[in-house]
Amino acid sequence: MTTIEIMAPAMFLALVVFLLIGLPVAFSLAALGLASGFVAIELGLFPPQFMANLPYRVFGILSNELLLSIPFFTLMGAILERSGLAEDLLEGFAQLFGGLSGGLAYAVIVVGAILGAITGTVAASVIAMGVIALPIMQRYGYNARLATGVIAASGTITQVIPPSLVLIVLADQLGRSVGDMYLGAIGPSFAQIFIFLIFIFLVSVFSPRSMPPMPQADRILRGWRLAKAVIRAVLPSMALIFIVLGTIFMGLATPTEAGAMGVVGAIGLAAGHRRLTWPMVREAMETTMAITVMVIFILIGATVFTLVFQGVDGGLWVEHLFTSVGADDAVTFLIVVNILIFFLAFFLDFFEIAFIVVPLLVPMANKLGIDLVWFGVLICVNMQTSFMHPPFGFALFYLRGIAPRSIKTSDIYIGAIPWVGLQMLLVAILIFFPQLATGLLDRPISGNLQSFEIQLDQNEAGAEAQAQSSAAGPDAAGNLPADDPADYFKKK
């Protein structure tokens, strides 16, 4: 192997070592990228002028208006997490489904999906559902593993449901619009909710004792009072969803503008629930600042690493790596990629996967003719598992932090396993049925624009040409001049 053939795998292995040691991801990426760049220049793998692209890349990140939507959506989620909206939603749907076996589990999934469409952050959904629903589910005798699994899964749906932060980041990395990514995620979002609800139904049929219905005495709302409670909880949520998603889909606002309007709506909801205080706003702003700074630093470090990695033909190495395992067609490539991301998610969170791994896969996906919206939504669905599977699932950590000590950590981990399987089931469905993600997208113009012809009236065109030929007369050889099509248009 030549030096340039060794450089790309050496960089990748060094990055894996740095991450396993536990060094900060952003600084590991930047340091490794700069060090590898100096080595590559000394070895003559690319000229020093190649590194002059780095300032332009960093400036491109800092001036990217799309990334400005991340702090807006994060702040909106942080405010809604503390606004009391989740309590109203869960109370209404718990009364609505409470008479069914598994009714509380149904309510948690539905409320988690609504919160996901509003907040866009997993932490807000998991913490809100854990604080509100877990004590109630324990009180009514729900199995601990089932209760914790339902709550964790309800929060991770947020990864796929617009306005997910993951979809915004993937749109930036894939070079597609956020609106297209949001449209592509609608079908898989409903499919994921439906799969979860079917699973709860099957468990309630075969093991009803693990999820008993609410006692009759606790279902105090009926008739118009129940309808009023549900409407009162759902209407503000629907209004906020329209402000954020409706304006994007209708072309009335960019994602950044929609996020800003969402923050205003979240502040209004918090004020309506009398939860709007300066300490709450300050805490939400501190959370937003920490997440935003983390994302920007990881993105800058990742662009340093990927610039040098592509400079030493890392893209060719990745392509050869996939072709060597037989992943030279679209379906096989997607299967291998999703297996790879599933195992990387044991050690990396979704930001690190999106900024480090995805840019290395995009050229190969383009070469195989894979729709990048389909590809991005598929990765997004897969990266749900980064929050769910042991030992580093963040949703499990959030749940462990708020769960009572009577619930064992092993119960939380074991309870998450079936839901990870359901998430991977959706991945498999998406691989073989891409229309689930691409069905709502605008159809591109098909056909070769250069092949279009203007059809003329043959009789009229022939008469004009004959008249012109007769007027011109024969040449020296006695032949009439050739027909000139341009003369037809001149006469017209």
Image: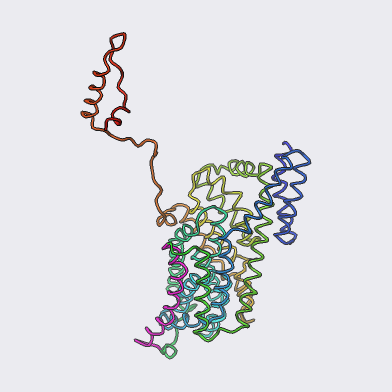
Camera-nearest residue between 107 and 158: 158
Furthest residue toward right: 42
Q: Quadrant of the C terminus?
A: top left
Quarter of image, res 214: bottom left
**x, y percent for residue 102:** 45, 77
In the image, is residue 227 part of the stretch drawn in magenta?
yes
**Residue extending furthest toward the top:** 477
Q: Quadrant of the N terminus?
A: top right
The image position of residue 60, as x and y in percent, is: 62, 54
Q: Is residue 238 above or below residue 467?
A: below
* Quadrant in the picture for residue 170: bottom right
Q: Determine if residue 391 is in view.
A: no
Q: Is residue 19 left or right of residue 207?
A: right
Give me the residue at 66% from left, 70% from top.
290
Q: Is the magenta stretch mostly helix, strand or loop?
A: helix
- Region rendered in magenta: 221-250
Pinpoint residue 448: horizontal percent, then vertical percent. Answer: 39, 38
Residue 235's x, y, as percent?
Answer: 41, 78
Task: Give the total number of marks visible in the rendering.
Answer: 0
Residue 483 to residue 369: above or below: above
Q: Which residue is drawn at 42% across and 57% down?
A: 436
Q: In terms of depth relative to the viewer, which is nearer, 60 or 123?
A: 60
Please, is residue 326 above or below residue 288 in the view? above
Q: Is residue 313 visible?
A: yes
Residue 247 falls inside the magenta stretch = yes
Q: Which residue is drawn at 60% across and 61% down?
A: 350
- Quadrant of residue 4 in the image? top right
Q: Which of 254 and 94 is in front in this view?
A: 254
- Compared across the picture, whether 74 is left or right of 487 comes to right
- Residue at horizontal 56 percent and vertical 69 percent from the top: 72
